[in-house]
Amino acid sequence: MGEGAVPQIKDLQNYVNFRLEEAIVELNLALELLERGYSRNASQKAFMAWKAIVSALVAINLDRIPRNEEERGWYRKIGFLAPTTGLNRIARRLEELGYREAVGINSLALKLHRYAYNGLYKDASDYYDRRDAIEDLVVLVKKLAQLIAELGREKEADEIMKRLGSITTQHA
């Protein structure tokens, strides 16, 4: 699948499928980069996969997620895109709707996003060393693969987990 026009939110099923495919592609790129030793780039790809999954979850729950008309307008206008500045708010709401661990996964993804941009720079990184960041990256990939499986893409999630297993075995 190449890049193309993003389906409109009005076509919910196509939009959800597009975002799930995007998440799968981003996770596979993250694993390829990790295998090559690029942990910061891999962390950013995993973060992008999280944003795509959040976008899919918002679209799936577009009628349930807003608490009032103001929120309904925000989610229909921009919230469904899972903007980085709105991820904390969206993750809390998804957890209220039954998506266990949404807040924790979001926090982990944001930590890795900061690592991707700042590296191990003192006072700008959540990590002491590269191995620490990679361990969190592995946790995030596992959790995202689990979500992808729960959203009906078990085959792709299994392939991601197998690939992750071979990478972590090689680098253990």
Image (tube, grey):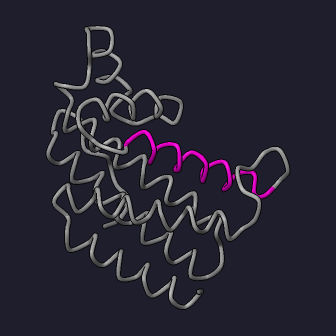
Specify the farthest residue to the right.
Answer: 122
Describe residue 172's horizontal placement relative to residue 31 as left or right.
right
Viewer-proximal residue among 60 and 13: 60
Secondary structure mainly formed by the magenta segment = helix
Region of the chain picked out in magenta, as a range? 102-120
Quarter of the C terminus within the rendering: bottom right
Give x and y (percent) for residue 12.
16, 39
Give x and y (percent) for residue 73.
30, 15
- Residue at 28% of width from left, 35% of height from top? 58
Give x and y (percent) for residue 160.
35, 74
Viewer-proximal residue among 65 and 169: 169
- Residue at 43% of width from left, 78% of height from top? 164
| Numbered marks: total | 0
Place residue 130 in its image quadrant.
bottom right
Q: Is residue 20 above or below residue 29?
A: above
Quarter of the N terminus within the rendering: bottom left
- Residue at 20% of width from left, 33% of height from top? 61
Specify the farthest residue to the bottom.
Answer: 170
Q: Is residue 116 magenta?
A: yes
Q: Is residue 90 above or below residue 114?
A: above
Q: Is residue 69 magenta?
A: no
Give x and y (percent) for residue 3.
38, 59
Describe residue 148's horizontal placement relative to residue 43 as left or right.
left
Describe residue 128's horizontal placement relative to residue 68 as left or right.
right
- Residue at 68% of width from left, 54% of height from top? 115
Q: Is residue 110 above or below residue 94?
A: below
